[in-house]
């Protein structure tokens, strides 16, 4: 994959260009500049043999490149967007009135560098790089989710055991409370029975000591 030619122009006026190979790309590029319809912003591509000319026009400034047909459209248009931003950032409003090739001496070197970068550096394909990074993030997230789910199963088992323990504790407390109440009432009944028995014994003893009918006077 390679970008072999690039230019920056205003209308049909070429402000800067660079070619990485001996081709007729410059001649074809000028024909395309003259045939681009209208004045509005547009992105378009034109085929010529096994090469594709990609054109980006924004605010009257046209950036064009020629790439081989295996390059697709994403990387060439990423290149055109980069060149447009650099050109406007460097020259500002001067592009509106500049003469033909006014920026060629300086900016042709930028075109050459960026053509090399977008043709050969894998990092130039931001979409694929982002997809790779997203794939790594997705794999990490899936791994973490699996761990969370596994931990969730363990937590669920622990919660079940805890709930059972809590249920057993509540039942034990209720049973202990009922047993305590039963013991308390049994003790009360036992105390009452003992007191009643002691009173009966005391009455019998007093009756025996006082010889029966004289019991009231004896008690006095």
Image (tube, rainbow, N blue to C red):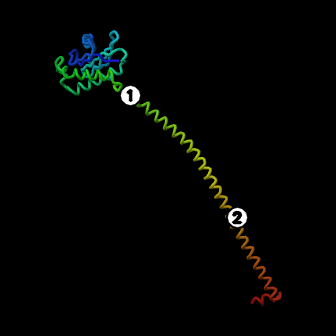
Labelled disc at residue 129: 1
Q: Quadrant of residue 26?
A: top left
Which quarter of the image is occupied by the C terminus? Answer: bottom right
Q: Nearer the viewer, mark 2 or mark 1?
A: 1
Q: Position of residue 125 (x, y in %)?
A: 36, 25
Q: Is residue 89 above or below residue 54?
A: below
Counting other residues with Cα less than 10 Å from the Cα at mark 2, is it few (<14), some (14-19), or many (20 or more)? few
User: Residue 76 location, x and y as percent?
Assistant: 32, 20
Q: Are marks 2 and 1 in contact (CB under 8 Å)?
A: no
For label 1, the crowd category at 10 Å Cα-Cα, with few meaning under 14, some 14 to 19 and many 20 or more, is few
The mark total stands at: 2
Q: Is residue 2 above or below residue 142?
A: above
Horizontal and vertical percent for residue 110? 24, 23
Q: Position of residue 211 (x, y in %)?
A: 83, 88
Residue at 19% x, 19% y: name it.
Answer: 104
Q: Give me the C-alpha separation between circle 2 and circle 1.
A: 77 Å
Q: Looking at this view, is 47 or 170 the one in front?
A: 47
Q: Residue 182: which numbered mark, if any?
A: 2
Lateral position of residue 91 relative to residue 139, left or right:
left
- Which residue lies at the image location 79% right of the left edge and 84% below the top edge? 205
Label 1 SS: helix
């Amino acid at each position: 994959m390679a970008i072999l030619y690039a230019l920056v122009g205003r209308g049909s006026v070429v402000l800067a260009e660079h070619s990485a190979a001996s081709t007729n790309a410059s001649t074809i590029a000028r024909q395309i500049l003259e045939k681009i319809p209208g004045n509005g912003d547009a992105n378009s591509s034109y085929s010529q043999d096994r090469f594709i000319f990609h054109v980006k026009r924004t605010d009257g400034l046209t950036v064009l490149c020629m790439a081989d047909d295996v390059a697709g459209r994403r990387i060439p248009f990423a290149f055109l967007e980069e060149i447009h931003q650099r050109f406007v950032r460097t020259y500002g409003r001067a592009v509106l009135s500049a003469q033909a090739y006014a920026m060629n001496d300086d900016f042709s070197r930028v075109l050459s560098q960026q053509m090399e970068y977008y043709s050969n550096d894998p990092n130039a394909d931001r979409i694929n790089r982002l997809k790779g990074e997203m794939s790594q993030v997705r794999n990490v997230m899936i791994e973490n989710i699996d761990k969370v789910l596994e931990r969730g199963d363990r937590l669920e088992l622990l919660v079940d055991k805890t709930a059972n323990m809590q249920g057993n504790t509540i039942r034990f407390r209720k049973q202990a409370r009922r047993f305590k109440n039963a013991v308390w009432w049994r003790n009360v009944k036992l105390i009452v029975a003992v007191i009643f028995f002691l009173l009966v014994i005391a009455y019998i003893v007093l009756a025996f000591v006082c010889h029966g009918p004289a019991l009231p006077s004896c008690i006095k």
